Image (cartoon, grey):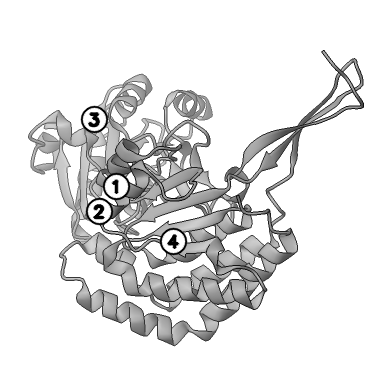
Amino acid sequence: MNHLLPIEKRNAVLNRMAFLLEQERKSIQAINQQDLSNYSGDDLAMEKRLLVDDAKIDAMILSLQQLSSQEDPVGKLRFDFTHENGMKIHNKTAAFGTVLIIYESRPDVTVEAGGIAFKSGNKILLKGGKESLLSNLKIVSLWHQALTDNGISSSWVEYLNYDRAETQAFLEKPTQKVDLIVPRGGENLIAFVKKHASCPVIVSGRGNNFVYVHPEADLDQALAVIINGKTSNISVCNALDKVLIDVNLPNWEAFASKIVSELQQKKVTVLGDESISKATSVPQIESDLIWYEEFLDYKIVIGTVNSNQEAIDKINKYCGGHSASIITKNNAVAQEFMENVDTAAVYQNASTRFTDGGQFGLGGELAISTDKLHQRGPIGLQHLVTNKWYIYGNGQVR
């Protein structure tokens, strides 16, 4: 096991890494262009995630600066108790040890997730996708430089350049101790890791997020939230895929038509259930199975419900457990919705696009968990810890 690095050392490495990213900005982008020209796929979302532009490098640098300024998540007292025999019992946060991050196409994860895991006292194993190999290797070489510049072994950050078969073999029989695995990517990747892993996995899950427009909605707000949720970035798990309109909304057909035309102007393919299709002439969905789908594309499904309870039931049946929003001026109805919808993040009158570590004040995130153990929603620095009991005695026996 690696000895826990003092917090001063961990912060010094993060700050040095931020400096090196700025210094090597042009070189990183040039190498990333090679990855982009090698990528022949036609997956728009994938290509968007693969690109490293100035804005992405700015975000990487900012995330490292924010991380270095945050307090140490390790060694925090969570519980203390003095036994009647005089023993002092403390429970404190502790590092996991070694964290493996498996991800697709996003070179910024090499910085941001690596930074969170390193700051929380862990050795990092990075397994990126083949499409971003050159960008990732360049960024890992900067991690190694930041470590060695501070007199720390470069083995704290390791890149696993494995194909699928090698990855499977490593998951089933790791050649070194791995304490936690975080897969970041599509459903296939997550299923693959869960199937083969021999240690705990945090599932950074799918989206398939819903907005429910209640009869007491501010319709301008509803429209803005839907357009933002669907069109501001299609390639992210907090994007919007489904809209439910309450048929008790006055003139709901006119409102539905307005949403459809705004979305179509933004090149979004709109499908509807039977009543929406009748009201707006959009194509009708072929089967209810589409309610389960996450699109990651310019595509959306709109349906109708008859009550808050029906909206809750439908969301709980179909959603990915990520995010759901109710648009209403009625706070009591909103509270009922928010308490009963089973997603990691629930909203009133706001876009699902805010389910993000940076937006939630976490200074970035390792993943957005749709599991309920051991943390749900965006996983920031303070969540990437386990715990440990410390007992201080002077000879007590039981």
Name the secondary structure under disc 4.
helix
Which residue is denoted by mark 4 in the rendering? Answer: 109
Quadrant showing the C terminus: top right
The reply to whether discs 2 and 1 touch (Cβ–Cβ < 8 Å) is yes
How far apart are the two marked residues, 4 and 2, measured between alpha carbons? 19 Å
Classify 185 as above or below 85: below
The location of residue 370, given as percent across then percent down, is 41, 37
Name the secondary structure under disc 1.
helix
Classify 297 as above or below 397: below
Name the secondary structure under disc 3.
strand
Q: Earlier in the sequence, mark 2 or mark 3?
A: 2
Residue 164, numbered circle: 2
Classify 352 as above or below 151: above
Of marks 3 and 4, the one in the foreground: 4
- What kind of residue is marked 4? Val
Residue 64, numbered circle: none
Of marks 2 and 3, the one in the foreground: 2
How far apart are the two marked residues, 2 and 3, measured between alpha carbons? 43 Å
**Which residue extends farthest top?**
398
The location of residue 302, given as percent across then percent down, is 22, 39
- What kind of residue is marked 1? Gln
Classify 143 as above or below 305: below
Q: 10 Å neighbourhood of mark 3: few (<14), some, or many (≥20)?
A: many
How far apart are the two marked residues, 2 and 1, measured between alpha carbons? 6 Å
How far apart are the two marked residues, 1 and 3, measured between alpha carbons? 44 Å
Q: Residue at position x 22%, y 63% from top?
A: 44
The location of residue 280, given as percent across then percent down, is 13, 42
Which residue is denoted by mark 1 in the rendering? Answer: 168
Which residue is denoted by mark 3 in the rendering? Answer: 304
